[in-house]
Amino acid sequence: MNYDKILIRYGDLIMKGRNRSQFEKRLLQQLKRSLRPFEALTYFKTYGRLTISLNGESYEPIAARIKDIFGIASFSPVLSVENDLEKIREASLMLMKSLDTPPKTFKVTAKRGWKAYPHSSQEMNHLVGSYVLPAMPELKVDVRNPEVELRVDVQEEATYIFVKVEMAAGGFPFGSNGKALLLLSGGIDSPVAGWMAMRKGLELEAVHFHSYPFTSEKAKEKVIDLARRLSYYAGAPFKLHLVPFTEVQTRLAAAKQDNLIITLMRRAMLRITEELAAKNGAHGIVTGESLGQVASQTLGSMNVIGRATDLPLIKPLIMMDKQEIINEAVRIGTFETSILPYEDCCTLFLPKSPSTNPNLRVVEYTEASIKELDQLIAEAVEGTEIMTLTPDAPAQSEDAGEDRWF
Amino acid sequence: MLYFDHCASTPPYPEVIDTLAEVMKVHYANPSSIHRAGAEADKLIGRSRALLGELFAVKPEEWVFTSGGTESNNTAIKGIAKQYRTRGNHLITTQIEHASVYDTFRQLEREGFKVTYLPVSQTGHVDVEQLRQAMTDETILVSVMHVNNETGAVQPIEAIGRMLKSSYPRTIFHVDAVQSIGKLPVVLKNWGIDLLSGSAHKVRGPKGVGILYVREGIQLYPLLTGGAQERGFRAGTQNVPGIVASAKAFRLSIQSAQERKERMEKLRGQLVEIVNAIPELRMNGSEDPQEMAPHIVHFSYPGMKPEVIVHLLEEQQIIASTKSACSSKDSKPSRVLLAMGAALPQASGGIRISFGDEHTERDVETLGEALRQMVDKLKPLERGITTTHELR
């Protein structure tokens, strides 16, 4: 079927009262940016929804992209025709006949959004149904449980005819709810947390701590690949802050508080991230923590670690099971990268029995005893390298070597 | 000299040669090493893989690099047979496969597998219905070539793939596409292909590099062990310069495939007309050009030793070939032509002309003239130099 338009329905932003137009504008901007490779597309905004004209572009690749744009609840490929009964009937029949598996039952659901049109919704149901039925002898009407619902939507500018409703990501448009920093480790959880945070309209920048040479170049590349995947969902250039953590980490390890090393490390990371947030206008920190998953993610640990920062800590995965998180990681396409076996700095110097209930006083005392800690943290912030990743740019390995070689 | 043996090997693109030399000079580190130099070499392989993924609309990780078409075919067929032996003991291929497929199945047969070799029609095409009838619950692998390397007959890969996916989704489908990549569309996902072999030197790349598509979710019992390279399916240090240069050759060939196809269809039509006008020569394959690859013309001079023809043409600065290069040194009649039901004299007299990007209508005209002269010269001797098989 050669559809000519895509009808887009908004997600949560429908509830946003007076901010609505701002959200709509952001979504349109987001759509245009994400669909830039499809040059022929044109966009048309009406109250409560958005229409994209395909102008000859094929539907499938565009649908695949739209599915992943935040702020869209669902969308439909549609045929648009003039508001003329005969044309509406012909197009309806053509659409019904084009379906891959011919349905046995259907119903027509007409909607007259443009009240100047001469036939009411009820009349239209009948007028279209009575035209389609005799032309498709196998087909019956079933108003309760039809296999196919043929929708005829009469609007002022045109009538839209469609049968398919595809679900999209939902949520709010990227960046419509402020900016936060995401702690991106390279594991399974943090990319999922990032996806969920972005879905709720947070603009994110990722922060990764590396301890080269204790961690490898490949561990860093893995994180870059994950961030690039997130940039696809962001639909916008995506910043990754690479923090040199070696000095801080080795100094903390030298404090000989083996059971607290994870706690100390985490607190240092939050302090560094807080400074990066201030520098970059972010107002929260998103982490991939899930309650009880590891020693640093018990309530006791979170209490002591979280006190290192005043910023709100957003933990989308906090009540999810590991398997649920894995399923999400597979779905958003980060799982395969996440399970590559490169050690990151969180697994480095891992003690035999990390404390699940660290003592805040001991922790603070230990930190105070490391005189140069503030200095090391400042240096880590200072030495942070920023990469900007774009969704349409080639993947990590794709800028290898010289372009002329390929 | 006019080189008409592009099915055997092709002249590399000049820029492919540059790439090969430059990468070889700079990136000599072992791509499996963990130091930076190794990582850079590894990234080049990653980028080559990504390029293949893009060209065939599949995931980069689904491509495995090998040492050539023969290794790709061996890796695929033996790898599946051994990996999925517990699922069943039956394999299906055709009577007209390239030796690297055919002999591999023969070997598996000696190891105890049951193999069905599908027959072909007089035009050299397999039939989807016959395949359906040969299928059993025990069938774990079906391997059919896309374009036959001798006759150029195009096999109904799309129809076979769809039939298998709808009726036998557990059976794995391998396609030897060595002769079709760069000349015909090759569609992996929609055609239901699980494994696909290609070779770089057939698409103006370097020798020594093959590619093998292994659909996500399929496991192969590795032919070569000794390292985790290529997802563990193919141990051994990768040929970094060869792989990068091959990726480029595949890109250049595939991106110009449609144009090439249209150009070569014209050349083929021209040559077919010339051959048909010479009564001593007989075209092999289908008369319908849609069923034949655009770059191959195959005909016989019944009763005449093909070697004599090749040498006579060579005297006129024309390079043509008999059968496929891999088996042209034995003088047995062509297994492919025999499968097509040709009488013995025709089966042993096959001449293959295969076009390249450099050929023009004028070159085909020159070739036509040479063919006419060759026939004039040989005609009085027809009885004298007949093949041994006819005398039997």
Image: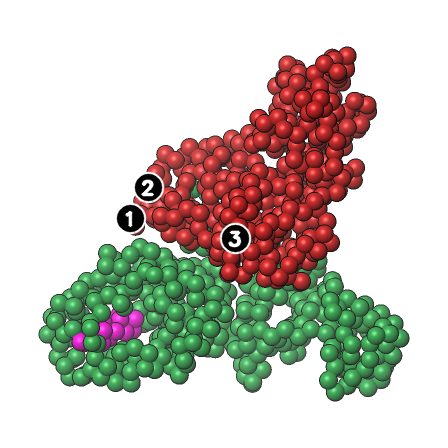
Callout 3 amino acid: Ala
The residue under the point 66% across, 75% down is A165
Q: Residue B294: where, in percent of width, then height?
A: 70, 37
Quarter-of-image position of residue B277: top right
Earlier along the polypeptide chain: callout 2 or callout 1? 2
Callout 2 amino acid: Ala
Say which chain is red.
Answer: B
Q: Which residue is mark 2?
A: B29
Q: Secondary structure at mark 3?
A: helix
Quarter-of-image position of residue B149: top right
Residue count near mark 1 (Cα–Cα under 10 Å), binned few <14, some 14–19, many ≥20: some
Q: Colour of chain A?
A: green
The residue under the point 41% across, 52% down is B232
Cα–Cα gap, marks 3 and 2 = 35 Å
Mark nearer the viewer, 1 or 3: 3
Q: Which residue is mark 1?
A: B35
Q: Is B300 part of what is drawn in magenta?
A: no
Task: Determine contact: label 2, label 1, CB under 8 Å.
Answer: yes
Q: Is A266 part of what is drawn in magenta?
A: yes
Discs 2 and 1 share one subunit: yes
Checking the image for residue B81, the label placed there is 3
> Of A22 and A303, which appears nearest the observer?
A303
When the figure is inspected, residue B367 is found, relative to residue B208, above or below; the finding is above
Q: Secondary structure at mark 2?
A: loop
The residue under the point 17% across, 69% down is A252
Q: What residue span does the magenta drawing correspond to?
A: A259-274
Q: Secondary structure at mark 1?
A: loop
Q: Is residue B109 left or right of residue A43?
A: left
When the figure is inspected, residue B82 is found, relative to residue A293, above or below; the finding is above
Q: Chain of mark 2?
A: B
